[in-house]
């Protein structure tokens, strides 16, 4: 993976709190959770677009 860049994300206060708690419970970070979710989404989206061709 290449160099990482910063980005901003606005979340509802309750959502962010729940996400932070989940990250602590899992011994990870909000950053890691978000990165994994986004990578999984992009992988799935790429598969769908390839299947549509």
Image (cartoon, helix red, strand yellow):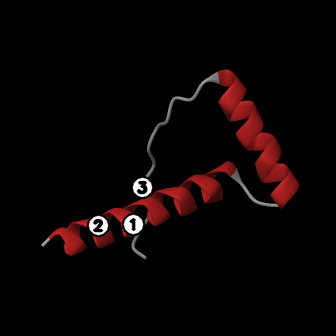
Q: Which residue extends farthest right?
A: 25
- Which residue lies at the image location 48% right of the left edge and 65% below the top edge? 40
Q: Is residue 26 above or below residue 20?
A: below
Q: Report the residue marked by disc 2.
A: 48
Disc on the earlier residue, 1 or 3: 3
Please identify the quarter of the rendering in which residue 45 is found: bottom left
Residue at image x 12%, y 73%? 53
Residue 12 image offset from top left, x and y in percent: 61, 24
- Identify the secondary structure beneath mark 1: helix
**Labels 3, 2: front one:** 2
Q: Is residue 16 above or below residue 51?
A: above
Which quadrant is home to the N terminus?
Answer: bottom left
Q: Given this view, does label 1 or label 3 mark the residue nearer the observer?
A: 1
Mark 2 in CB contact with mark 1 (< 8 angstroms): yes
Quadrant assignment, res 20? top right
Picture layout, residue 8 above or below residue 51? above
Residue extending furthest toward the top? 13
The Cα atoms of the two marked residues, 1 and 3, are separated by 22 Å
Gap in angstroms between the C-alphas marked 2 and 1: 6 Å
Residue 11 in picture, x, y percent from top left: 57, 29
Q: Which mark is residue 44?
A: 1
* Residue drawn at point x = 29 percent, y = 67 percent: 48
The residue that mark 3 highlights is 5
Mark 3–mark 2 distance (CA, rounded to whole Å) = 27 Å
Is residue 26 shown left or right of residue 8? right
The residue nearer to you, when weighing 32 against 46, is 46
**Frontmost residue, 38 versus 6:** 38
Q: Which type of secondary structure does the marked residue at label 2 adopt?
A: helix
């Amino acid at each position: 993976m290449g160099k990482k860049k910063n980005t901003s994300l606005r979340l509802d206060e309750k959502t962010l709190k729940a996400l932070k708690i989940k990250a602590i419970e899992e011994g990870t970070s909000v950053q890691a959770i978000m990165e994994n979710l986004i990578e999984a989404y992009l992988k799935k989206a790429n598969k769908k677009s390839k299947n549509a061709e």
